Image: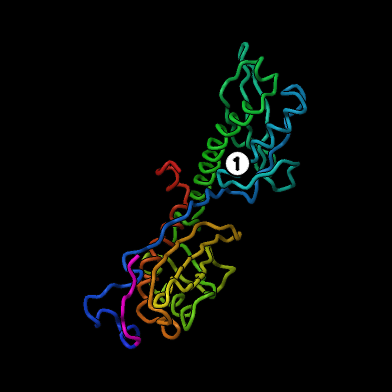
Amino acid sequence: MTGIKHLSGLCLLLLLASCGDLPRPFAGKPGALAMHLATPPVARLVVIMPGRGSINPDAAKIWADDVAQALVAGEMPAEVGNPGAIDWSVGLGISKAGDLIVPLYELHDGTGKLRGTVDGTPIPGALWNQGDKDLLRQSAQQAAPKIGDLLTNIEAVRMQADPDSLLHRAARVVLLPGQGASGDGNQSLTAQMAIYLKTHGIIVIADPDQADYKLQVDVAINTASPTEQQVQVIWIVTDARGHEAGRIAQLNDVPVHSLDGHWGEVATMVAEQAAGGVAEVISNQLPTHKNKSGA
């Protein structure tokens, strides 16, 4: 990976453009995006054990655990148990169509109201009654994305009706203090990010309680060779509930100790390249975006 090569400390402290046509660290490197969370309209989903007559007791527990695991794998917080007063839940059951068993997944909101049903793939009754582990896991894995789509559609309707939702206004982001950088890197990166977020229509605010998202930069600097250091910059986006929404990771090599003091144009480049990734993370949280992309 190309970094700044053989630049004097003075040149690094100045605008790099004034030093001629030299390699520019982090330029053209917006950072790779991690998988974005498919944020449901609830803090967690509780998977309710199926009632008697749906499946034998031993298989019932396996089925419920498989459903919870499949939902978690789809970035939906879920666990098996009894729902509390405000918990959304997924009830498990079956319907019969001749000799076939159709697994049913019923989504209930925090008031107990049925918000939608997902039909699983029909299974021969004889196989279902055996409680085959692979069959139950396959059924759960097939149903989880459909449950996620149902949650996304519910959230999309809610946000469309809410004039204060992010479908109708700019996102508000609070920048938390950076950590891990040498010199003035933590302060410089955060200050430059505040500038470039505004170019993407994002409002930077100071009050965490009023923010839709929080953003923090985490820097790690490791010595790669006697003459170079490897700089890893990670921007972590979390939503108002503290759930991670995504990451933007940037990696580059710089001369040893060149960032011990003033980051200058390096901080500008890093923030400029990463700001678009932050905006994309936030955009990908909107249910309308997920529906269009099929996420």
Image quadrant where one finds the N terminus = bottom left
**Considering depth in this image, is 134 or 37 the residue closer to the camera?**
134
Q: Position of residue 19 (x, y in %)?
A: 25, 82
**Is residue 7 on the magenta stretch?**
yes
Residue 242 on image: x %, y %: 60, 60
Residue on which the image places disc 1: 71
83, above or below 198, in the image: above
Q: Looking at this rendering, what residue extends furthest in the top direction? A: 98
Q: Residue at x 64, y 36 (%)?
A: 67
| Viewer-proximal residue among 17 and 85 | 17
Q: Residue at x 49, y 77 (%)?
A: 181
Amino acid type of the residue that numbered disc 1 sits on in the rendered structure: Leu
Between 112 and 190, the one lying in front of the other is 190
Tell me the crowding category of disc 1: few under 14, some 14 to 19, or many 20 or more residues within 10 angstroms, Cα based.
Answer: many
Q: Which residues are magenta?
A: 1-9
Q: Name the residue furthest left.
A: 21
Q: Percent from the top left, x then y, of residue 253? A: 39, 71
Depth check, front residue: 58 or 55 = 58
Which residue: 35% across, 79% down? 265
Residue 134 falls left or right of residue 37: right
> Position of 82 compared to 16: left or right?
right
- Quarter of the image where one finds residue 110: top right
